[in-house]
Image (spheres, rainbow, N blue to C red):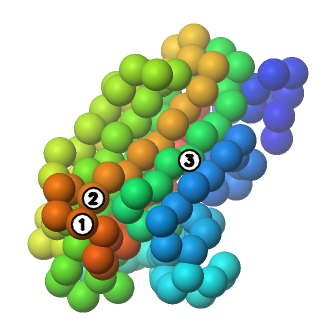
Amino acid sequence: MACGNGPAAGTHQLSDLAWSSAGNSWGPVEKDMSNGGNQARDGRTITIAGTTYAKGLGVNAFSEIVYYLGGACSSVTTEVGVDAEAEGRGTVSFEIYKDDVKVADSGRVTSATPAKRLTADLAGANELRLVVTDGGDGTNSDHADWAAPVLTC
């Protein structure tokens, strides 16, 4: 899906694009499913507060996913939340970075928090970084979802 230095013009589900790098504290980052366990492809349908999503990225705090944009994209929009597989546990924070500048932050999110919509301006950015932190109380059950993340280029 790349054209020149960044993604092609149009809208793209992030889970359909290749990332530059990805790190996750419990198993690999999962595409189009929750984090699950510590093996690849062991997640479930992404579910935040009873709403399911066919597309997205499942992670566990601490995580960071980096996409190379090459200045070609204008924005990203996503729903974020703790996945239902955390069974009422889990506390995280979602952060979006345009290069090294934080441009969106969910604040503290728990399993009781409904999905939050984050939108970030990415005009001129070389990189998009998606970061999930532990919400200040350790990483147990911190299964976090970037649900239906759409990149506009």
> Left or right: 79 with respect to 68?
left
Q: Which mark is residue 138?
A: 1
On the image, the x and y values in percent for residue 129 come to 51, 37
Toward the viewer: 148 or 83?
83
> Left or right: 57 with respect to 114?
right
What separation in Å lies between label 3 and label 2 (alpha carbons)? Answer: 15 Å
Q: Earlier in the sequence, mark 3 or mark 2?
A: 3
Q: Are marks 1 and 2 in contact (CB under 8 Å)?
A: yes
- Helix or strand or loop: what does disc 1 sit on? loop
**In the rendered structure, which amino acid carries the disc numbered 3?**
Ile
- Helix or strand or loop: what does disc 2 sit on? loop
**In the rendered structure, which amino acid carries the disc numbered 2?**
Asp
Toward the viewer: 20 or 122?
20
Residue holding disc 3: 65
Residue holding disc 2: 134
**In the rendered structure, which amino acid carries the disc numbered 1?**
Gly
